Amino acid sequence: MILGTWNLENLFLPGGPSGPRDKAAYETKLAALAAVLKELDPVLLGVQEVGEAQALRDLAGTVGGDWHTALSAHADGRGIRVGFLSRVPLEVLTDTTAFPPKLRPVQTDDTSGETASAGRGFLAVEAATEAGPLRVAVCHLESKPLSYPGGRFQPRNEGERARFGAYALYRRAAEAASLRALADELLAGDGRERDVAVLGDLNDEVQAQAATTQILLGPPGSEIGSAGFEAPDKGDAARLWNVAPLIPSARRFSRINSGRRELIDHVLVSHRLVRRLSAAGTGLPDGTDLRLPSVGPDPSERRGKPGSDHAPVWVRIG
Protein backbone atom coordinates (compact mmCIF):
# COMPACT_ATOMS: atom_id res chain seq x y z
CA MET A 1 0.00 0.00 0.00
CA ILE A 2 1.02 3.62 -0.57
CA LEU A 3 1.26 6.01 2.41
CA GLY A 4 2.18 9.61 1.70
CA THR A 5 1.93 13.34 2.21
CA TRP A 6 1.06 16.16 -0.17
CA ASN A 7 0.77 19.92 0.20
CA LEU A 8 -2.22 20.73 -2.04
CA GLU A 9 -1.41 24.48 -2.19
CA ASN A 10 -4.39 26.60 -1.23
CA LEU A 11 -7.25 24.18 -1.77
CA PHE A 12 -10.08 26.65 -1.14
CA LEU A 13 -13.58 26.98 -2.49
CA PRO A 14 -13.80 29.63 -5.21
CA GLY A 15 -14.33 33.31 -4.48
CA GLY A 16 -12.37 33.70 -1.25
CA PRO A 17 -9.20 35.79 -0.84
CA SER A 18 -6.88 32.78 -1.23
CA GLY A 19 -8.90 30.50 -3.48
CA PRO A 20 -9.62 30.40 -7.22
CA ARG A 21 -11.54 33.40 -8.48
CA ASP A 22 -14.35 31.41 -10.09
CA LYS A 23 -15.87 27.94 -10.40
CA ALA A 24 -14.07 27.17 -13.65
CA ALA A 25 -10.64 27.80 -12.11
CA TYR A 26 -11.64 25.75 -9.06
CA GLU A 27 -12.70 22.79 -11.17
CA THR A 28 -9.45 23.02 -13.16
CA LYS A 29 -7.46 22.87 -9.93
CA LEU A 30 -9.48 19.90 -8.65
CA ALA A 31 -8.99 18.06 -11.93
CA ALA A 32 -5.21 18.60 -11.86
CA LEU A 33 -4.93 17.38 -8.26
CA ALA A 34 -7.24 14.42 -8.91
CA ALA A 35 -5.19 13.28 -11.90
CA VAL A 36 -2.13 12.94 -9.65
CA LEU A 37 -4.10 11.19 -6.91
CA LYS A 38 -5.51 8.63 -9.34
CA GLU A 39 -1.98 7.69 -10.42
CA LEU A 40 -0.56 7.78 -6.88
CA ASP A 41 -3.46 5.67 -5.56
CA PRO A 42 -2.67 6.05 -1.84
CA VAL A 43 -4.40 4.09 0.89
CA LEU A 44 -3.73 6.99 3.26
CA LEU A 45 -2.53 10.49 2.37
CA GLY A 46 -1.80 13.35 4.75
CA VAL A 47 -2.59 16.70 3.14
CA GLN A 48 -1.78 20.32 3.87
CA GLU A 49 -3.14 23.73 2.84
CA VAL A 50 -6.80 22.75 2.85
CA GLY A 51 -9.32 25.51 3.47
CA GLU A 52 -12.89 24.29 3.80
CA ALA A 53 -13.96 20.71 4.53
CA GLN A 54 -16.15 20.86 1.43
CA ALA A 55 -13.09 21.53 -0.74
CA LEU A 56 -11.47 18.31 0.50
CA ARG A 57 -14.70 16.41 -0.11
CA ASP A 58 -14.91 17.91 -3.61
CA LEU A 59 -11.39 16.67 -4.33
CA ALA A 60 -12.29 13.17 -3.14
CA GLY A 61 -15.38 13.25 -5.33
CA THR A 62 -13.35 14.32 -8.35
CA VAL A 63 -10.94 11.42 -7.85
CA GLY A 64 -13.87 9.03 -7.54
CA GLY A 65 -14.45 5.92 -5.47
CA ASP A 66 -14.92 5.62 -1.73
CA TRP A 67 -12.88 7.99 0.45
CA HIS A 68 -12.82 8.87 4.12
CA THR A 69 -11.68 12.36 5.09
CA ALA A 70 -10.53 14.04 8.29
CA LEU A 71 -9.62 17.71 8.70
CA SER A 72 -8.07 19.61 11.58
CA ALA A 73 -10.23 22.23 13.26
CA HIS A 74 -7.16 24.46 13.70
CA ALA A 75 -6.40 26.73 10.73
CA ASP A 76 -3.79 29.46 10.49
CA GLY A 77 -4.38 33.12 9.64
CA ARG A 78 -4.83 32.30 5.95
CA GLY A 79 -7.37 29.61 6.79
CA ILE A 80 -5.24 26.62 5.75
CA ARG A 81 -5.06 23.40 7.74
CA VAL A 82 -4.02 19.76 7.59
CA GLY A 83 -6.08 16.64 7.01
CA PHE A 84 -6.29 13.14 5.56
CA LEU A 85 -7.69 11.37 2.55
CA SER A 86 -8.09 7.65 3.15
CA ARG A 87 -9.41 4.58 1.39
CA VAL A 88 -9.95 2.91 4.78
CA PRO A 89 -11.93 4.00 7.84
CA LEU A 90 -10.29 6.56 10.15
CA GLU A 91 -10.57 7.35 13.83
CA VAL A 92 -9.35 10.79 14.93
CA LEU A 93 -7.05 10.41 17.94
CA THR A 94 -5.77 13.97 18.45
CA ASP A 95 -6.28 17.42 16.96
CA THR A 96 -4.17 19.96 18.81
CA THR A 97 -1.94 23.03 18.55
CA ALA A 98 -0.60 22.85 22.12
CA PHE A 99 3.09 22.96 23.00
CA PRO A 100 4.16 20.25 25.49
CA PRO A 101 3.90 21.28 29.17
CA LYS A 102 7.56 22.20 29.84
CA LEU A 103 8.08 24.19 26.62
CA ARG A 104 7.78 27.94 27.21
CA PRO A 105 6.12 30.38 24.78
CA VAL A 106 8.33 31.64 21.94
CA GLN A 107 8.79 35.16 20.55
CA THR A 108 6.98 35.83 17.27
CA ASP A 109 7.63 39.51 16.42
CA ASP A 110 9.45 42.71 17.37
CA THR A 111 6.90 43.71 19.99
CA SER A 112 5.50 41.65 22.83
CA GLY A 113 4.13 38.92 20.58
CA GLU A 114 4.68 35.36 21.73
CA THR A 115 2.87 32.08 21.38
CA ALA A 116 2.53 28.78 23.21
CA SER A 117 0.81 26.98 20.34
CA ALA A 118 1.46 25.86 16.79
CA GLY A 119 0.24 28.00 13.92
CA ARG A 120 -1.65 25.03 12.42
CA GLY A 121 -3.09 21.94 14.04
CA PHE A 122 -1.41 18.56 14.42
CA LEU A 123 -3.94 15.89 13.44
CA ALA A 124 -3.44 12.23 14.38
CA VAL A 125 -5.61 9.35 13.21
CA GLU A 126 -5.73 5.58 13.38
CA ALA A 127 -6.46 3.88 10.05
CA ALA A 128 -7.85 0.37 9.83
CA THR A 129 -5.56 -1.15 7.17
CA GLU A 130 -5.39 -4.78 6.03
CA ALA A 131 -2.07 -5.10 7.89
CA GLY A 132 -3.61 -3.84 11.11
CA PRO A 133 -4.01 -0.46 12.80
CA LEU A 134 -1.79 2.34 11.48
CA ARG A 135 -1.34 5.49 13.56
CA VAL A 136 -0.35 8.59 11.61
CA ALA A 137 0.13 12.26 12.50
CA VAL A 138 0.11 14.98 9.84
CA CYS A 139 1.57 18.46 10.25
CA HIS A 140 2.48 21.69 8.48
CA LEU A 141 5.22 23.44 10.42
CA GLU A 142 5.98 27.17 10.43
CA SER A 143 7.02 28.38 6.98
CA LYS A 144 10.57 29.20 5.96
CA PRO A 145 9.51 32.00 3.56
CA LEU A 146 9.26 35.02 5.82
CA SER A 147 6.51 37.58 6.14
CA TYR A 148 6.88 40.92 7.85
CA PRO A 149 4.61 43.46 9.57
CA GLY A 150 1.93 44.93 7.32
CA GLY A 151 1.76 41.88 5.07
CA ARG A 152 5.17 42.54 3.49
CA PHE A 153 7.27 39.74 1.99
CA GLN A 154 10.44 41.87 1.81
CA PRO A 155 12.28 43.24 4.88
CA ARG A 156 13.03 46.91 5.46
CA ASN A 157 16.66 46.01 6.18
CA GLU A 158 18.91 43.06 6.94
CA GLY A 159 18.41 43.41 10.67
CA GLU A 160 14.68 42.86 10.24
CA ARG A 161 15.34 39.87 7.97
CA ALA A 162 17.61 38.28 10.57
CA ARG A 163 15.21 38.86 13.47
CA PHE A 164 12.16 37.49 11.68
CA GLY A 165 14.21 34.54 10.45
CA ALA A 166 15.00 33.80 14.10
CA TYR A 167 11.34 34.17 15.14
CA ALA A 168 10.25 31.70 12.45
CA LEU A 169 12.98 29.27 13.49
CA TYR A 170 11.98 29.52 17.17
CA ARG A 171 8.42 28.65 16.29
CA ARG A 172 9.26 25.86 13.84
CA ALA A 173 11.58 24.23 16.40
CA ALA A 174 8.91 24.52 19.11
CA GLU A 175 6.37 23.00 16.74
CA ALA A 176 8.79 20.15 15.98
CA ALA A 177 9.18 19.49 19.71
CA SER A 178 5.38 19.47 20.05
CA LEU A 179 5.05 17.05 17.16
CA ARG A 180 7.69 14.80 18.71
CA ALA A 181 5.64 14.74 21.92
CA LEU A 182 2.63 13.63 19.88
CA ALA A 183 4.75 10.97 18.18
CA ASP A 184 5.72 9.65 21.63
CA GLU A 185 2.03 9.25 22.43
CA LEU A 186 1.40 7.36 19.20
CA LEU A 187 4.43 5.10 19.70
CA ALA A 188 3.29 4.40 23.27
CA GLY A 189 6.75 3.20 24.21
CA ASP A 190 7.10 0.47 21.60
CA GLY A 191 7.74 1.40 17.97
CA ARG A 192 8.99 -2.17 17.45
CA GLU A 193 5.43 -3.42 17.63
CA ARG A 194 3.39 -0.42 16.44
CA ASP A 195 2.89 0.90 12.92
CA VAL A 196 3.36 4.67 13.38
CA ALA A 197 4.16 7.44 10.90
CA VAL A 198 4.64 11.19 11.18
CA LEU A 199 4.41 13.08 7.94
CA GLY A 200 3.76 16.47 6.38
CA ASP A 201 5.29 19.72 5.23
CA LEU A 202 8.09 20.32 7.75
CA ASN A 203 9.38 23.41 5.90
CA ASP A 204 12.90 22.14 6.49
CA GLU A 205 15.27 19.75 4.80
CA VAL A 206 16.77 16.51 6.04
CA GLN A 207 20.44 17.46 6.51
CA ALA A 208 21.97 17.27 9.96
CA GLN A 209 21.98 21.04 10.31
CA ALA A 210 18.19 21.18 9.86
CA ALA A 211 17.38 21.08 13.55
CA THR A 212 13.62 20.86 13.20
CA THR A 213 13.72 17.60 11.26
CA GLN A 214 16.36 16.15 13.61
CA ILE A 215 14.18 16.85 16.66
CA LEU A 216 11.59 14.42 15.32
CA LEU A 217 13.90 11.42 14.98
CA GLY A 218 14.34 10.55 18.62
CA PRO A 219 17.51 8.71 19.71
CA PRO A 220 20.29 9.12 17.10
CA GLY A 221 22.49 6.41 15.65
CA SER A 222 20.39 4.16 13.41
CA GLU A 223 19.49 6.38 10.46
CA ILE A 224 18.88 4.70 7.10
CA GLY A 225 22.23 4.21 5.40
CA SER A 226 24.23 4.43 8.64
CA ALA A 227 26.34 1.63 10.08
CA GLY A 228 23.89 1.26 12.95
CA PHE A 229 20.76 0.78 10.83
CA GLU A 230 20.91 -3.02 10.81
CA ALA A 231 21.90 -3.35 14.47
CA PRO A 232 18.96 -3.47 16.90
CA ASP A 233 19.26 -1.54 20.16
CA LYS A 234 17.07 -0.21 22.92
CA GLY A 235 16.50 3.13 21.14
CA ASP A 236 14.46 1.45 18.40
CA ALA A 237 11.29 1.59 20.51
CA ALA A 238 11.34 5.42 20.44
CA ARG A 239 12.96 6.15 17.07
CA LEU A 240 11.44 7.48 13.88
CA TRP A 241 13.23 6.96 10.56
CA ASN A 242 13.11 9.60 7.82
CA VAL A 243 12.67 7.76 4.51
CA ALA A 244 14.48 10.47 2.50
CA PRO A 245 17.65 8.35 1.90
CA LEU A 246 15.47 5.74 0.17
CA ILE A 247 14.27 8.26 -2.43
CA PRO A 248 16.37 8.16 -5.63
CA SER A 249 18.77 11.09 -5.49
CA ALA A 250 17.58 12.60 -8.77
CA ARG A 251 14.05 12.84 -7.37
CA ARG A 252 14.89 13.83 -3.80
CA PHE A 253 12.94 17.10 -3.86
CA SER A 254 9.33 18.09 -3.31
CA ARG A 255 9.40 21.80 -4.18
CA ILE A 256 11.43 24.26 -6.25
CA ASN A 257 12.13 27.44 -4.31
CA SER A 258 13.54 30.32 -6.39
CA GLY A 259 15.04 27.79 -8.80
CA ARG A 260 16.50 25.55 -6.07
CA ARG A 261 15.24 22.01 -5.53
CA GLU A 262 14.48 21.16 -1.91
CA LEU A 263 12.93 18.30 0.03
CA ILE A 264 10.77 19.90 2.72
CA ASP A 265 7.95 17.34 2.80
CA HIS A 266 8.78 14.21 4.76
CA VAL A 267 7.59 10.78 5.85
CA LEU A 268 9.00 9.36 9.11
CA VAL A 269 8.15 5.85 10.27
CA SER A 270 8.50 3.60 13.30
CA HIS A 271 10.82 0.58 13.59
CA ARG A 272 8.05 -1.86 12.71
CA LEU A 273 7.22 0.08 9.54
CA VAL A 274 10.75 0.89 8.34
CA ARG A 275 11.50 -2.83 8.06
CA ARG A 276 8.54 -3.31 5.71
CA LEU A 277 9.19 -0.48 3.24
CA SER A 278 9.74 -1.61 -0.34
CA ALA A 279 10.12 1.81 -2.00
CA ALA A 280 10.00 5.56 -1.40
CA GLY A 281 9.73 8.48 -3.78
CA THR A 282 8.40 11.85 -4.76
CA GLY A 283 5.92 12.60 -7.52
CA LEU A 284 4.38 9.46 -8.98
CA PRO A 285 5.47 5.84 -8.43
CA ASP A 286 6.12 5.35 -12.15
CA GLY A 287 8.67 8.21 -12.13
CA THR A 288 6.51 10.68 -14.05
CA ASP A 289 7.89 14.24 -13.81
CA LEU A 290 5.25 16.57 -12.34
CA ARG A 291 7.09 19.66 -13.66
CA LEU A 292 6.85 21.72 -10.51
CA PRO A 293 6.86 25.50 -10.84
CA SER A 294 9.58 27.58 -9.20
CA VAL A 295 7.98 29.62 -6.42
CA GLY A 296 8.92 32.74 -4.50
CA PRO A 297 8.05 34.06 -1.03
CA ASP A 298 4.57 35.44 -1.81
CA PRO A 299 1.88 32.70 -1.80
CA SER A 300 -0.66 35.04 -3.44
CA GLU A 301 1.31 34.93 -6.70
CA ARG A 302 -0.09 31.48 -7.41
CA ARG A 303 -3.68 32.14 -6.40
CA GLY A 304 -5.97 29.99 -8.52
CA LYS A 305 -3.19 28.11 -10.31
CA PRO A 306 -4.03 24.48 -11.14
CA GLY A 307 -2.37 21.60 -9.35
CA SER A 308 0.16 22.24 -6.59
CA ASP A 309 3.64 23.70 -6.18
CA HIS A 310 4.63 20.61 -4.15
CA ALA A 311 5.11 17.00 -5.20
CA PRO A 312 3.71 14.16 -3.11
CA VAL A 313 6.20 12.25 -0.97
CA TRP A 314 5.29 8.60 -0.48
CA VAL A 315 6.36 5.15 0.70
CA ARG A 316 5.23 1.73 -0.40
CA ILE A 317 4.67 -0.68 2.48
CA GLY A 318 4.99 -4.38 1.80
Image (cartoon, rainbow, N blue to C red):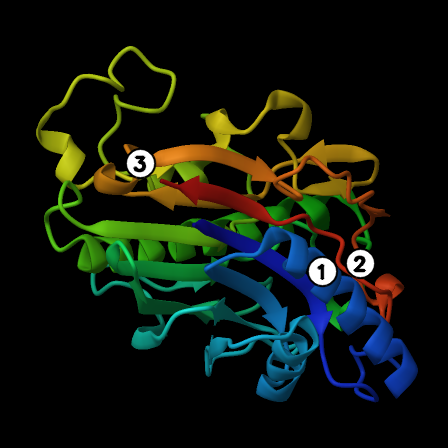
First along the sequence among labels 3 and 2: 2
Comes first in the chain, label 1 or label 2: 1
Asked whether the residues under the numbered discs 3 and 1 touch, taking CB atoms below 8 Å apart as contact, a structural biologist would say no
Q: What's the CA distance linking mark 1 and mark 2?
A: 5 Å
Image vertical order of residue 61 relative to residue 105, above or below = below
Q: In this view, does 9 lie to the left or right of 49?
A: right
Q: Quadrant of the C terminus?
A: top left
Q: Which of marks 3 and 1 is nearer the N terminus?
A: 1
**Type of the residue with mark 2:** Phe
Residue 196, position as x, y percentages in the image? 28, 52
**Residue 274 occupies quadrant:** top left
- Tell me whether circle 1 and circle 2 mark residues in contact (CB < 8 Å): yes
Q: Quadrant for residue 220, please give it.
A: top left
Alpha carbon separation for disc pair 3 and 1: 41 Å
Q: What element carries label 1?
A: loop
Q: Where is residue 49 in the image (x, y as percent from the top left)?
A: 63, 68
Q: Nearest to the eye among marks 3 and 2: give it.
A: 3
- The outermost residue toward the top is 227
> How many other residues sit within 10 Å of disc 3, few (<14), some (14-19) or many (≥20)?
few
Could you tell me which residue is drawn at 84 percent across and 64 percent down? 306
Give the label on residue 147, or none: 1
Question: Residue 156 in the image: x percent, y percent?
Answer: 82, 53
Q: What residue type is labelled 1?
A: Ser
Give the residue at mark 2: 153
What residue is shown at x 59% (from left), y 56% (from top)? Answer: 6
Identity, as a three-letter code, of the amino acid under mark 3: Arg
Which numbered marker is on residue 276? 3
Q: In percent of the image, x 36 and y 23: which residue is there?
A: 224
**Label 3 SS:** loop
Q: Please report the residue visible at 67 percent of the width from the left and 48 percent of the height from the top.
A: 311
In the image, 272 versus 62, the foreground residue is 62
In the displayed structure, would residue 112 be above or below residue 61?
A: above
